[in-house]
Image (cartoon, rainbow, N blue to C red):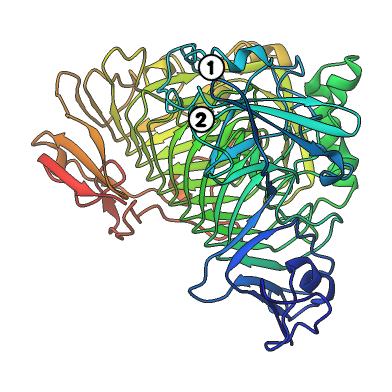
Amino acid sequence: MTTYYVSKNGSDQNDGHKDSPFLTIQKAADVAIAGDTVTVHEGVYREWVKPLNPGLSSRRRIVYQAAENEHVVIKGSEVIEHWEEVGDHIWKTSVDNQLFGDFNPFAKAVWGDWLTSIDHTNHLGAVYIDGKAMFEAHSREALEHPKQRQTVENFFTHEQLPDFYSDDTKYLWYADVQENRTVIYANFQGIDPNTALTEINVRPCCFFPERTGINYITVRNFEMAQTATQWAPPTGEQQGLIGPHWSKGWIIEDNVIHDSKCSGISLGKELSTGDSYYYRRFDKPGYTYQIETVFAGEHNGWSKDNVGSHIIRRNHIYNCGQTGIVGHMGCAFSQIYDNDIHDIATRHEFEGWEIAGIKLHAAIDTQIRHNRIYRCSLGTWLDWQAQGTRVRQNIYYHNGMDFFVEVSHGPFLIENNIFASKYALRHLSDGGAYVNNIIAGDMLVDDVRNRSTPYHLPHSTTIKGMTPVYGGDDRYFNNIFISREKAKHCGTDMYDGHPQSLQAYIDDVQTQAPTDLEGYEAKKTPVYINNNAYFNGAKNYADEANKLSDPSFDSKFAIEERGRSLYLTINLPEAYTVFKVPAKVTDTLPHVRLVDADFEQPDGSPLKINTDLLGRVADDHVLTGPIQSLNSGENHIKIW
């Protein structure tokens, strides 16, 4: 086992040992083999690191790390000097296209399936002034008369979103790509770009192997920024600023990841299983191509033995245009925890369906735990095949929408989270369980009967069948529902009319016997709802046997930032502390009907939901909500 060293004072002609370090991280990546460590000393490294060799197991990794207590930055950008002022605040520079090689991001549009702005006017290029990304103008003339950005709307609800960038939209650039040169014009609003740090992105990635199957890599303690990543739909290559590229067993930890044009971390699909064929061909729906992608992935080695099982922890991820973390299939069996994710897809330079702080397809047995997700267009979006997925102890606030689970059949478990944005939850799935959460915002629950999506054998990528979402077969236990000012809907009353047991549903269907599909489609499926609390006008399921319902009670619910810390304020009625209910376990979470599976740990062992958001372990009976130290009356608690 060898340690190779990299330093800004080194040379790639050296041997990489401590006294003769390499100059580039890539040189170390070319020679490092399983069991080796690459230690990088302080400085800014402008390169795309493409690991050449894999580790062999979780014990024989290749580790890439910043030297202890040293700040190492990997950038996908280059410094651009020699700007010439050509008008009021307008500057220009001419860049030789040899700088870009065969990838000029200013010539490439943001493009791919499920992107809704497909007019090819938004490009992968970006200009940064003193580290801040500027906005692209769509003409040279627009630089001279920058306009305040129009009201931004939530992509799903068409309601106004918080505008975090209104003061920055005056900083504009425009690129004229010519045969041999790229001329960039920019309005720096009075800043002299020749005395500031002025950069443009030139590379799509900072740390991303070109080949698949580069397993067991650890990347830690770097800052990585300013890449020209392409839009990452589930039907195309999902490229990130950093990612394993269809490999197994990566650990990405303690990094600062920011300013990726589209995606920060990719745990996603590779190119051979689909390349945005809907927008290339238009001959059949994207939904059909995505089904083909899933089967192609299975044919191309998608299994627990080959792909996934990554650990993404303690990273700070922000200012990415599409997703903080994206993945399709390659995210399966992974753990994503203790990350701080914010300001994702809030610049609104382009729009599409694949946006979120965390956006995953086929997150089989993936565990998303104790992340702080805020100021994102959408917090977390689980789309297709959320099976065995567990989302727990996360805090969502100030998002356009907190949480969305789409066309999945479970079992997926959402427990001990706080959903605090005005639009808290969108549920277009079945087979889910929501346990011990605070849901303090609008909810939408619906079926989806025009799309049949896959489900799997338990804890496996093997496809067992396909079915549409009939609605129901959901579980809500031990939650606190808080309706907000001008809220449209919060609570469980949207399930009124659904039976309370599987046997009641079966009996109802069989009243039409002999019957097949039409009999099942005609009846509402069972739901399991009990032991929840409802405040501020939130409404309960009509047949809920045991509940704490006080619709007129004002909980005074609020999430407050104090520096990097976060506080919860909530007022609770006198009856709250005596309303203790059983902690849910595998045996008391009803079996999922369509998938024919139980709620359990990824290894198949039983689970018990008695550890709250703050890590406190309760006994066999718990308070409703995600914090077991709450009391009747006023509560003011540090939660991050």
Looking at the rendered structure, the secondary structure element under dot 2 is: loop
| Marking on residue 156 | 1
Res 111 seen here? no
Please name the residue shown 49% across and 27% down the image: 189
Kindly identify the amino acid type of the residue bearing the numbered disc 1: Phe
In this image, 191 relative to 615: left or right? right
Q: Which mark is residue 517?
A: none
Query: Up-down: is 149 above or below 19?
Result: above
Residue 639: percent from left, percent from top: 28, 50
- Mark 1 residue crowding within 10 angstroms, few (<14) / some (14–19) / many (20+): few
> Which tag, 2 or 1, sits closer to the chain's start?
1
Q: Is residue 65 left or right of residue 483?
A: right
- Say which amino acid is labelled 2: Leu
Image position, residue 522 (x, y; %): 61, 10
Q: Is disc 2 in contact with disc 1, using a CB cutoff of under 8 Å?
A: yes
Mark 2 crowdedness (10 Å alpha carbons): few <14, some 14-19, many ≥20: many
Q: Quadrant of the N terminus?
A: bottom right
Name the foreground residue: 252 vs 130: 130
Q: Residue at x 51, y 12 (%)?
A: 147
| Spot occupied by residue 230 in the image (x, y as percentages of width and height) | 74, 36
Residue 545: quarter of image = top left
Camera-nearest residue between 73 and 114: 73
Residue under label 2, please give it.
378
Which image quadrant for residue 327?
top right
Whether residue 98 is visible, yes or no, is yes
Q: Position of residue 387 (x, y in %)?
A: 63, 42
**Residue at the image position 33 percent from the left and 18 percent from the top:** 542
What whole-number distance in Å separates the C-alpha atoms at marks 2 and 1?
10 Å
The answer to which of 9 and 73 lies nearer the viewer is 9
